[in-house]
Image (cartoon, rainbow, N blue to C red):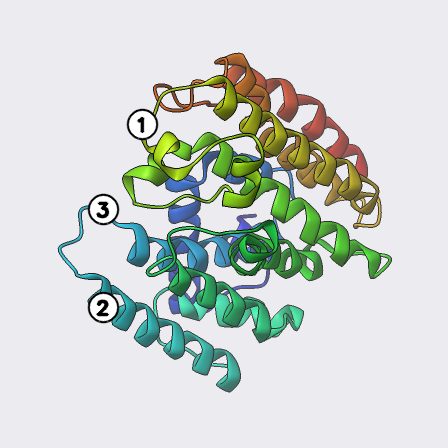
Amino acid sequence: MDELTAAGITDPELRASYAECKRLNSLHGKTYYLATLLLPKEKRPHVHALYGFARYADEIVDDLASTLTIPEKAALLKEWGDGVLSDIKTGTSSDHIGRALVDTVRRFDISISYFEAFLHSMTMDLSVTQYQTYDDLMEYVYGSAAVIGLQMVPILGYSDSAAFAAAEKLGIAFQLANFIRDVGEDLDRGRIYLPLEDLATVGVTPELLAERKLTPEIRRALEFQIARVRRLQSEASAGIELLDPVSQPCILAASELYCGIVDEVEKINYEVFTKRATTSTWRRLKVAGPAFAKALRAR
């Protein structure tokens, strides 16, 4: 039985929407997609729907090949985002991505506030290029990453509401790990996501960062951020046990692989300006194998 049938999704147009979300996930979110395969078939399409929504919005904002101006991108994001939010409220959608998202939101009673926060953060990306403090950054990260974890919990299933706080922390850890890996790429987009206050503490200025040379000061700044990722991951770990047992292997694998990005940064000696820290196929398989066995046992 295929995933959509297992999930009770039979309408042809709705199936097509879910299929497009799955395509986006498999194409752009390889690690995320791998972790999703550890879920029971009936849960996977709904995770794909969440990813499809997030990816489509992100493409509007960060498509470097686009000829659209910033105001044009903002207008397009608002038009599309407002349309999807309106569809969530009415319970129906004709949007190719929104159709699957609305179905998922309605099935699992996921709060619309999470999607509003996500779109707010995507809008911030069009105008905000630096964050003075960690608290300032958290306004952005809440919408860009924490809410992804919060959206997932109803789909994954849980035994205690404390799972939501843990999911929020893990989502933040994932995002911060990406920021550490992507320092150079973010500079290409004119952005610095590492809090300026944290950087200043170890003697790093935006100008020094823009030189794209690994200095002892920048190394210390990255070490500080890596410690923060590991602390958040550790604090979130107990919450994974509050999820449905059939969902735990997926999130354990995602935690290992996403937060493991910082291990890869260390392996390339923090050379984030000249190299891209990537999770090797070997490490993915090493994590996925035992997780798959655990997932089968849980089912």
228 vs 106: above or below:
above
Q: Nearer the viewer, mark 3 or mark 2?
A: 2
Secondary structure, mark 1, is loop
Image x and y of residue 54, in percent? 44, 57
- The answer to whether residue 182 of the structure is visible from this angle is yes
Secondary structure, mark 3, is loop
Question: Residues under labels 1 and 2: Cα distance?
Answer: 29 Å
30 vs 193: above or below:
above
Comparing 294 with 25, the one in front is 25
Residue 64's tag is 3
The residue shown at (72%, 45%) is 247
The residue shown at (55%, 57%) is 136
- The answer to whether residue 279 of the structure is visible from this angle is no
Q: Earlier in the sequence, mark 1 or mark 2?
A: 2
Q: Earlier in the sequence, mark 3 or mark 1?
A: 3
The residue shown at (49%, 86%) is 90
Question: Residues under labels 3 and 2: Cα distance?
Answer: 15 Å
The quadrant in which residue 18 appears is bottom left
Q: Amino acid at mark 1?
A: Glu
Q: Mark 1 and mark 3 in contact (Cβ < 8 Å)?
A: no
Residue 211's tag is 1
Residue 71's tag is 2
The residue shown at (64%, 56%) is 152
Comparing 53 with 210, the one in front is 210
57 vs 291: above or below:
below
Q: Residue furthest bottom?
A: 90
The quadrant in which residue 207 appears is top left
Image x and y of residue 181, in percent? 47, 30
